[in-house]
Image (cartoon, helix red, strand yellow):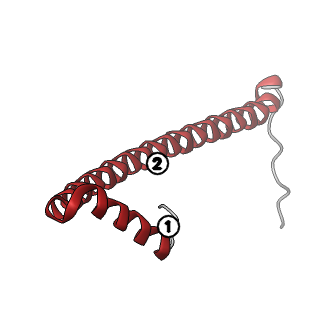
Amino acid sequence: MFDFSFGEMMVVALVALVVLGPERLPKAARFAGLWTRRARAQWHSVKAELENELAAEQLKRSLQEGKQAIQETEAQLRDLAQAARQPVESDPAQPAEDPPRDG
């Protein structure tokens, strides 16, 4: 998360020891650790919620695309059915041709 080298952490620890003193330093370290854990937990919670929202949005988009594809296929099938019905409906008086008989 933070890019601290070992030397930088030692300087921070030394400054904290001088400012807080040896009596209050362990308590301050526990307090800092507690807040760090809380911040990480909150971050993971927000991250998980965002990932769930993105997954739900992607699923909605996928369902919408599927619905659109089904509607387009239905329209094509209707057009094909209409095209197949047109020759039959346009000349109903003409008898259908019988296939030639062998014999």
Residue tagged 1: 4
Find residue 4 and report its horizontal and vertical position in percent: 50, 67
Task: Answer above or below: position of 12 versus 35.
Answer: below
Q: CA distance from mark 1 to mark 2?
A: 35 Å
Which is more toward the observer, 42 or 85? 42
Disc on the earlier residue, 1 or 2:
1
In which image quadrant can residue 73 be found? top right
Viewer-nearest residue: 32 or 12? 12
Q: Position of residue 12 (x, y in %)?
A: 40, 63
Which residue is painted at 48% across and 44% down in the image?
54
Q: Position of residue 75 (x, y in %)?
A: 68, 32
Where 53 sits versus 94, above or below? below
Front-most of residues 63 and 82:
63
Quadrant of image for the C terminus: bottom right
* Label 1: which secondary element: loop
Q: Quadrant of residue 69?
A: top right
Residue at the location (47% across, 76% down)?
A: 6
* Within-10-Å neighbours for mark 2: few <14, some 14–19, many 20+: few
Q: Inspect the image, locate mark 2, and give the three-letter code of the amino acid beneath it.
A: Ala
Q: Nearer the viewer, mark 1 or mark 2?
A: 1
Q: Which mark is residue 38?
A: none
Left or right: 50, with 21 as reference point: right
**Which disc is residue 55 wearing?**
2
Question: Amino acid under label 1?
Answer: Phe
Q: Residue at x 84, y 29 (%)?
A: 94
